[in-house]
Image (spheres, rainbow, N blue to C red):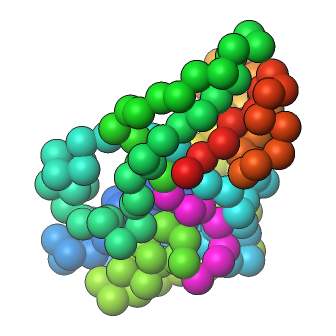
Amino acid sequence: MGANKVCIVGAGVSGMVAAINLARDGYEVLVLEKGSKVGEAPYNPRIDLTPLDKEMTWNYIGLNLDPCFQELKEWVACVRSRRAVLNPTVYIVERGPRESSLDNYLYKEALRAGVKFEFSHPVQSLADIPDNSIIATGLDSQIENMLEIPFIPMHGYGAAIEGVGKDNVGDCILR
């Protein structure tokens, strides 16, 4: 790739934000995504819960994502058989392939900025990654193995069910 061309591997949040900002700075950007469309991560669609200072974050990444983030007013959780009502400054955001998701919002912004995409383009080896590339694949064990990045696999579960089993351990009700 030429000096003003950049390839980004991965069309998740970090890859899309990088692509949008680079395109706005005059780079020709190509995003390679292994899925057939944005938002096809293994656990999508889903709602992510995140504490953040919106103004600081939006200034830092160069994008106002207010349309995608909604403040969580109350979080009812059961922890070790005890019910707790939390009132943190936390935001929820939809992830996944649906039209209303953060992934699709960023995809549309990237297209407006002139970013090009190649879907169904998995990276099988280091030879598949061109020079001037950014690897933004998140927690992808295949890429981590390929780049010889040590990691420890972890597995976990979560629940977000309105009005079901409020007294059971592990239930989490978001309002």
Residue 78 is a magenta residue? no
Q: Closest to the observer: 118 or 86?
A: 86
Instruction: Inspect this view and state whether residue 10 appears.
Output: no
Q: Closest to the observer: 55 or 126?
A: 55
Q: Where residue 93 sits in the image (x, y, percent)?
A: 50, 58
The residue segment tinted magenta is 93-99
At x 67%, y 57%, the residue is: 46
* 150 displayed left or right of 167: left
Locate residue 53: give its quadrant: top left
Q: Closest to the observer: 127 or 72?
A: 72
At x 74%, y 77%, the residue is: 36
* 62 displayed left or right of 90: left
Q: Where residue 65 sits in the image (x, y, percent)?
A: 32, 65
Q: Measured along the vertical axis of the image, is residue 51 above or below residue 23?
A: above
Q: Measured along the vertical axis of the image, is residue 157 above or below residue 160?
A: above
Q: Where residue 40 sits in the image (x, y, percent)?
A: 72, 66
